[in-house]
Image: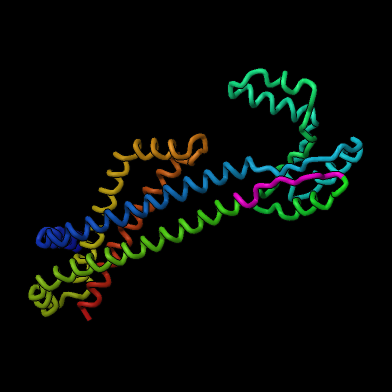
Amino acid sequence: MHFLRFSFRQAFQGLWRNSVMTFAATFTMILMLILLSTLVIVINGVEAGLEFIESRVEVRAELYPVAESQIAAFQAELESRPDVGSVAYISKEEALQRFIDDREAQGLTNIAAAYADTNPFPAYYSIELADPRQSAEVVALLEAQTGLVSLVLGQQTGIDRLVELTAQLRNLGFIVLSFVGLTVLLIVVNSIRMALMARAQEIEIMRLVGASDRYVRWPFILEGVLIGLFGAFITLALLLVASPAISDIARDIAGSVPLGFDESLTYQITAITLGAGLALGGLCAWISVRTYLR
């Protein structure tokens, strides 16, 4: 207990004596943690939106006018495949009625009368895949049915682009965080090193009277940990204040697409912010003290 009290007292004194460097280190730590939290929020929202879009992806296969037995037989073949989630057959009449219903929901009138004597819509299969990203084999099978399927409409290109965008966003975020993290590392290391130099004579006396490296090292490591802890708490407080505005902006951008902003994301950001702040602060201090005591 005496060692802990001594270490914390010395750590707080060191932070106070080097207040300018402490402020610079804490401010830079806050900047990095805000960027880290923002990256987590954005990637979480993009992946939640991608999952929502994938759940509504379908492959549509428009059909020639053929016998119902042929349509039912091929539908059964599709439903037996492990990469197909479900298959719905939409007749010409149902396709027309869906079109009319959609247009009337948009406020258009007299749509039904316009199509009273004609039906330009083909019958089709609406196919939901077990994995929307893996549609190539199903599309190839449908295109091979030249006497049954007239046209295959898929959305694989759009899904692939969204997946690629998510990966690029994640990589760009990590690159930016790496540069900011390096800046934090240099500032905190220099802050701890200045504290070591300011107390060089005191440290030398402590070592002459038999103080171990552990006794000398821990107050400075705690300084780095406290800088990380202060930065994490301030970051979380800023995010809490800004959370309503962030949610409103995100929902305006996403519209009806859910973004996965729930309690689990709050816990995730809290854990990541605290963990990153403590780990980076402690690592910076450990590097600085280890280099000095060699």
Direction from residue 271 to residue 123 in the image, left or right: right
Direction from residue 144 to residue 250 in the image, left or right: left
Residue at the (47%, 45%) spot, across then down = 45
Q: Quadrant of the C terminus?
A: bottom left
Relative to residue 101, is residue 291 depicted above or below? below
* Residue 153 shown in magenta: yes
**Where is residue 192 drawn, in percent x and y?**
19, 67
Residue stretch in magenta = 148-158
**Where is residue 254 drawn, in percent x and y?**
47, 39
Residue at the (33%, 61%) spot, across then down = 279
- Res 218 → quadrant: bottom left
Residue at the (31%, 40%) spot, across then down = 242
Relative to residue 112, is residue 16 depicted above or below? below
Using the rendered image of the protein, determine whether residue 9 is visible from the camera's viewpoint: no
Q: Quadrant of the N terminus?
A: bottom left
Direction from residue 36 to residue 78 in the image, left or right: right
**Where is residue 51 drawn, in percent x and y?**
57, 45
